[in-house]
């Protein structure tokens, strides 16, 4: 990602730019394989990323938000009173009916019970915590949306009406991995915040909820405590500011998202074969077939032959 690439234009935070809007997940899918993106998004076929683990993670995030809502609405609510709503969310959003439904449910329940215990403790009065906030960062070719899984806001003091600090948190379930710090969502968090609230300090952090789905055994001493925040602000800031620098001589990590947006706009959906990824792809038995390309090829062949031509005429 560091090859030379001149950058002629700068980036502004104008949200009314008229640029196309993409979800980060969609652009990352395109970068992995443009043809897979076309099957999933253009043809609206089953998304291969919509698997049990993805549904599990989505349920945990929604479940945490539901618990926080219940707690805010009724300080006397109990864990038992929250369970029916959680089960309903599981049926709607989680991997209900999967072969390992029970395993996923037990793992998610352990994380949510831990979250409930934290919620029922006395919160620091100077902080407000919310679950999930959609952020939009304007890049050169598009606007990219992503979600901060947890937002902590220091309430303003009597002398200052602005928050003292906003913490945007990326949550993971399972064991920490070094590549989590390279997640492109992190510089997008920083960039989106700076474009929307340039005068408010921000911290970008990772947190980990539960280890139940982690493979292998790891020393518990090496793992962060439940709910502990790992500050990655400096790396996120450097990535975002490198992208913003109009005089830089090297590519920034966020440039690849512009590449994806331009490729989609240009209709470039060539397959990108990879033995391991292709073997697990939902479209492996039809790829690289493309109905649009087939129709165009047949139409071109028909035009070349012309009416009345062929061996049976």
Image: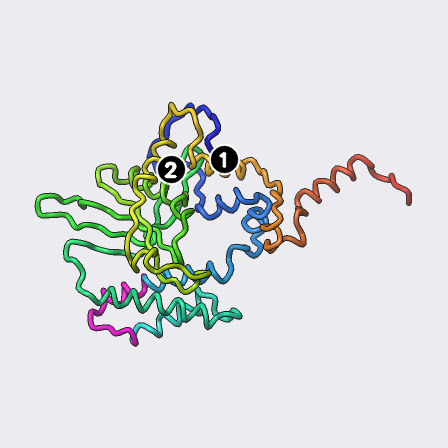
Measured Cα–Cα span from mark 1 to mark 2: 14 Å
* Magenta-drawn segment: 65-80
Where residue 110 is drawn, which disc sits there?
none
**How busy is the neighbourhood of tag 2: few (under 14 within 10 Å), some, or many (20 plus)?**
many
* Label 1 vs label 2, nearer the camera: 1
- Camera-side residue: 265 or 99? 99
Residue 261: x percent and y percent?
49, 38
- Camera-side residue: 194 or 141? 194
SS type, badge 2: strand
Q: Is residue 288 magenta?
A: no
Quadrant (top left/top right/bottom left/bottom right) for the C terminus: top right
Q: Quadrant of residue 16?
A: top left
Where residue 138 is drawn, which disc sits there?
2
Q: Main secondary structure of the magenta part?
A: helix
Which residue, given by chain and number where applicable, does mark 1 sit on? 259
SS type, badge 1: helix
Left/right placement of residue 20 relative to residue 225 reads right
Task: Looking at this view, name the residue that lies furthest to the bottom.
Answer: 80
- Camera-side residue: 26 or 171? 171
Residue 46: x percent and y percent?
56, 57
Residue 27: x percent and y percent?
48, 43
Residue drawn 53% across the image and 39% down it: 264
Left/right placement of residue 245 relative to residue 121 reads right
Q: Quadrant of residue 159?
A: top left
Residue 253: x percent and y percent?
43, 36
Is residue 93 shown above or below 206?
A: below
In this picture the colour scheme is: rainbow
Residue drawn 34% across the image and 54% down it: 149
């Amino acid at each position: 990602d560091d090859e030379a690439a001149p950058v002629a234009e700068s980036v502004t935070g104008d949200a009314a730019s008229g640029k196309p809007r993409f979800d980060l997940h969609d652009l990352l899918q395109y970068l992995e394989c443009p043809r897979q993106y076309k099957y999933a998004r253009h043809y609206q076929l089953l998304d291969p990323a919509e698997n049990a683990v993805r549904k599990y993670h989505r349920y945990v995030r929604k479940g945490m938000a539901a618990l926080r809502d219940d707690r805010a609405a009724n300080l006397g609510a109990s864990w038992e009173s929250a369970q029916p709503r959680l089960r309903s969310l599981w049926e709607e959003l989680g991997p209900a009916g999967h072969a390992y439904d029970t395993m996923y449910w037990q793992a998610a329940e352990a994380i949510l019970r831990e979250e409930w215990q934290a919620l029922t403790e006395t919160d620091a009065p100077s902080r407000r915590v919310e679950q999930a906030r959609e952020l939009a960062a304007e890049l050169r070719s598009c606007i990219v949306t992503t979600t901060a899984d947890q937002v902590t806001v220091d309430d303003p003091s009597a002398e200052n009406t602005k928050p003292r600090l906003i913490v945007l948190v990326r949550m993971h379930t399972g064991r920490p991995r070094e590549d989590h710090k390279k997640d492109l969502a992190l510089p997008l968090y920083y960039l989106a915040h700076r474009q929307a609230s340039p005068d408010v300090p921000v911290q970008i952090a990772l947190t980990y909820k539960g280890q139940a789905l982690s493979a292998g055994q790891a020393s518990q001493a090496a793992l962060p405590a439940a709910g502990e925040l790992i500050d990655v602000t400096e790396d996120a800031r450097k990535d975002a500011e490198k992208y913003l620098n109009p005089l830089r001589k090297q590519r920034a990590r966020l440039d690849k998202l512009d590449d994806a947006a331009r490729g989609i706009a240009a209709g470039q959906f060539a397959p990108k074969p990879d033995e391991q990824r292709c073997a697990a792809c939902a479209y492996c038995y039809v790829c690289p077939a493309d109905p649009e390309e087939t129709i165009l090829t047949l139409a071109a062949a028909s035009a070349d032959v012309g009416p009345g031509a062929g061996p049976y005429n």
